[in-house]
Amino acid sequence: EVSRSSREAPLSACAQNGWGRHDCSHSEDVGVCCTGGCIRGNGNGGYQTATAPRTNGRDIRMADCTEDGCCRVEIMMNGMWGSICDIGFSEANAAVVCRQLGCPAAGEVMKGFGRGTGMIWMDGVQCQGSEGKIQNCPSNGWGRHDCTHEDDVGVCCRDGCGVPPPPPVPEDDEEYDENDPEHRRRVEIPPPLPVRLVGCTATSSVGGCCRVEIKYSGMWGTVCDDGFSDANAAVVCRQVGCSGGVSRPSFGSKEELPIWMSRVSCTGQEDGISNCKFAGWGKHDCAHYHDVGVCCNPGCAAQDAGVV
């Protein structure tokens, strides 16, 4: 449901329900009629040529590279990194990726390279080979795919070009200036990411129970109940300004959201749930019926389905 004031430049600047959030089928795909029959398109039978979103810095990266210089291709959309499906991914596509990374244009395709996390942004990519960016090639559309992360594509650029350098590892006896901002960045614990408690009930004898959601990369998502303890729940309750904390596995689902966290293990002393140990952002083997809830005392979080 898009609301436009007619002054926005691109359609993506208009108010809407959120990327990928809808209750429609493709029989309800909208069309437009432009004055005088004016259109711009490439006649690719349902494919679209998308202009890449503006980002600060490079919007493509190579991840999980192997010793032979082959890596999973990831691109950024709306501030979130995601992978590309390998179905129909050609050497012309790989050449565009390598050139975009500043490498020689030749590139080898590695289908089924390895499992990424988060979004799968592109599928059905059909580059001619002359494009400046993979995001400018025709595709099925942003986030439209019939793949799993097992189908994430990889690319091998010539001579391992494009492989990111390893992070610097300081020597054990290396001395640091405590006032050095780079040193503080390495050793300080980052501030916790925002959490909210939603879908709250008041049926528990312990107090109001709510589903836990956390905001990562600008998008709210759920937490898997796999191993979620009362110590984890206590961290969540304290983060939203409540006391107590009891875990409620399989609390409820939120199908349109990603599952951001799994196998969370807190000591109970952390400032926020994102400071606890867990499997990694978007890494899980859960379905949404495993979304975890917590019950804070005395139901304080349920009083307002609170967003923090």
Image (spheres, grey):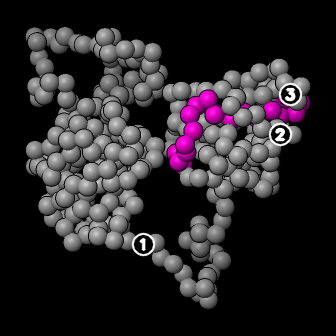
Which amino acid lies under the numbered mark 1 shown in the image of this protein? Pro
Please report the residue visible at 77 percent of the width from the left and 42 percent of the height from the top. 233
Q: Are marks 3 and 2 in contact (CB under 8 Å)?
A: no
Which amino acid lies under the numbered mark 2 shown in the image of this protein? Gly
For this rendering, which residue is in front, 181 or 93?
Answer: 93
Q: Earlier in the sequence, mark 3 or mark 1?
A: 1
Give the side of residue 187 with respect to residue 105, left or right.
Answer: right
Q: Earlier in the sequence, mark 3 or mark 2?
A: 3
- Residue 130 x %, y %: 10, 49
Give the side of residue 265 with respect to residue 97, left or right.
Answer: right
> Where is mark 2, residue-wise?
245
Q: Residue 191, which numbered label?
A: none
Magenta residues (range): 281-300
- Residue 20 x %, y %: 42, 27
Q: Residue 207, which numbered label?
A: 3
Q: Determine the CA span between mark 1 and mark 2.
A: 40 Å
For this rendering, which residue is in front, 57 or 273?
Answer: 273
Q: Quadrant of the C terminus?
A: top right
> Where is mark 1, residue-wise?
166
Q: Earlier in the sequence, mark 1 or mark 2?
A: 1
Res 1 quadrant in image? top left
Give the side of residue 128 with respect to residue 236, left or right.
Answer: left
Q: Say if 302 sits above or below 194 in the image.
A: above
Which amino acid lies under the numbered mark 3 shown in the image of this protein? Gly
Q: Are marks 1 and 2 in contact (CB under 8 Å)?
A: no
